[in-house]
Image: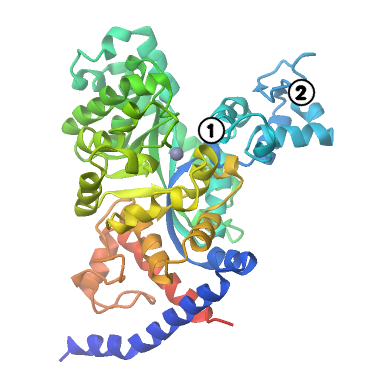
Amino acid sequence: MRRLVPFLLALALCPLAHADEAGAARALEKARTNPWLLRQFMFAFPKGGDLHNHLDGSIYAENIIKWASEDGKCVAPASGQISFPPCDAQRPPVKDYAADSVNYRQLVDAYSVRNYERAPKSGHDQVFDTFGRFIPGTLGREGDMLREASNRRGAENTVYLELLQSYGMDKARALAAAEPGAFKADRPAGDWASHPVLQRIVADTRAELDRHEARWRELSHCGQATAEPGCGVAVRYLAQVIRTFPPEQVNAQIALAFLLVKADPRYVGLNLVAPEDDPGTLRHYREQMGVIGSLHKLMPEVQVSLHAGEFAFGLVPPEDLRDHIHLALKLAGARRIGHGEGIGIETGAPATLRDMARRGVLVEINLTSNAIVHDLKDGQHPFLLYRMFGVPTALSADDEGVFRIDLTNEYQRAAATYPSLTYRDFKAMSRNALAYGFVEGDSLLADTATGHFMPACASERANGEPKGPRCRALLAASTKARLQWELEARFARFEAQAHAP
Ligand SMILES: [Zn+2]
């Protein structure tokens, strides 16, 4: 009888919860064709996480200009290239140059895709070329960057953020450049990982992250009454390997990424970035997947998400479009795929899609990024193809500063572009961004479509503290479960207020 009471209580509460959910679903339908209402709805809608967010790309141009000005950096007027002082006649101080409002506008455009349609460059080239121009302006401002990225997610009712960043990767590349023989493919991958200098880089990088996080928390007043919204977001990191360097340097970076994830719980996985259509990437792609696979055999607990199939037809020869997603899954053991736009043109795509659905490999969907970089819009995007095959999906921001967007914009874009997506579909995608996140711990959810809890919490509602000891134990042992509990509580609050007008 004691066991029945919570069950009956849950049943009694259920109709209310369903009424609230139905009301929120009606509110979405009313808002769907009105951009202003839809923006408001999706801004408040609880978004579980953002699994694909490059820290460098998440910074808005205005902050880059502000920091570079304050830090005495210099800028080349024609290109917008930022550099370190001393400045000179060809490279005046950013502070002076950007004081002119016409110059300021030109710099904002140079560090983002703002007005890119009017420039002679394609979206692809503008996006990939902009990083080199502005990154010198962000160096030394890592705490400010973490503050900006986390605050935006916190303000948008998002619980979790996985940030891609490359701390320490420059040192791993320098090591491999000095000792290329040590990181050659004919050496066992275990030898790379045990290189004493690489071990030292791991320790230095962890200390560097300590400093950046401390600065962020100081700037954001975390732990104080005036704490900013980002303090409440659970942030984890993906070690980000730049894959367009010579093979030895890529190998050393991949080894460093594995070691960072092993050594530091804030690192929950790794990823490979930089243009997939770069000739060097195309030449070495299979080899890079094999390197990840062999290190994965040595350190199977390290989780892998990979940019793969970030392609549109015509970007590269058809032969290069055949198998990148397939190889990321088969050789590298990827548990998540970033972009995956090229799936429809891969050989054996139906089998790959069925395999992803069966094994629960999630695709990180970046709608605005794909629309700008590859002109892949609306029905041309394989988003619905993945969903048709039952492959889990989650919406993410990619490079929100460069694209001048936020995560809300991606939910809004999906709702406006794909009328078949229901309110429950958005809830499932929001839950997916936690369930398939690499954050530590067992899942609270048995099913992201229904939101049903695992048996230990089956009779509970995410309202206050769990009542049963087994559920309390699950939450106490699992950060992921605690975040999922929080997300469900936010859904309940949102739905209680989101009745259609
Ligand atoms: Zn990306």
Q: Note whether 459 is above or below 404 in the view shown.
A: below
x, y percent for residue 13: 35, 88
* Quadrant (top left/top right/bottom left/bottom right) for the N terminus: bottom left
Residue 62 vs residue 400, the one in the foreground: 400
Q: Residue at x 18, y 18 (%)?
A: 188
Looking at marks 2 and 1 on the same chain, the residue that comes earlier in the sequence is marked by 2
Q: Name which residue type carries label 2.
A: Pro
Query: Under tag 1, what secondary structure?
Result: helix
Q: Quadrant of residue 459?
A: bottom left
Residue 13 vs residue 244, the one in the foreground: 244
State the scheme by which the image is colored: rainbow
Q: Which mark is residue 449?
A: none
Query: To which residue does mark 1 refer?
Result: 124
Q: Note whether 180 is above or below 64 in the view shown.
A: above
Q: Note whether 243 is above or below 408 in the view shown.
A: above
x, y percent for residue 275: 45, 29
Q: Residue at x 36, y 23 (%)?
A: 282
Mark 2 closeness class: few <14, some 14–19, many ≥20 residues within 10 Å: many
* Quadrant (top left/top right/bottom left/bottom right) for the C terminus: bottom right
Query: Under tag 2, what secondary structure?
Result: loop
Q: Name which residue type carries label 1.
A: His
x, y percent for residue 360: 24, 53
Query: To which residue does mark 2 refer?
Result: 93
Q: Residue at x 58, y 56 (%)?
A: 228
Q: Is residue 265 visible?
A: no
x, y percent for residue 397: 49, 48
Q: Residue at x 20, y 71 (%)?
A: 456
Q: Note whether 223 is above or below 210 in the view shown.
A: below
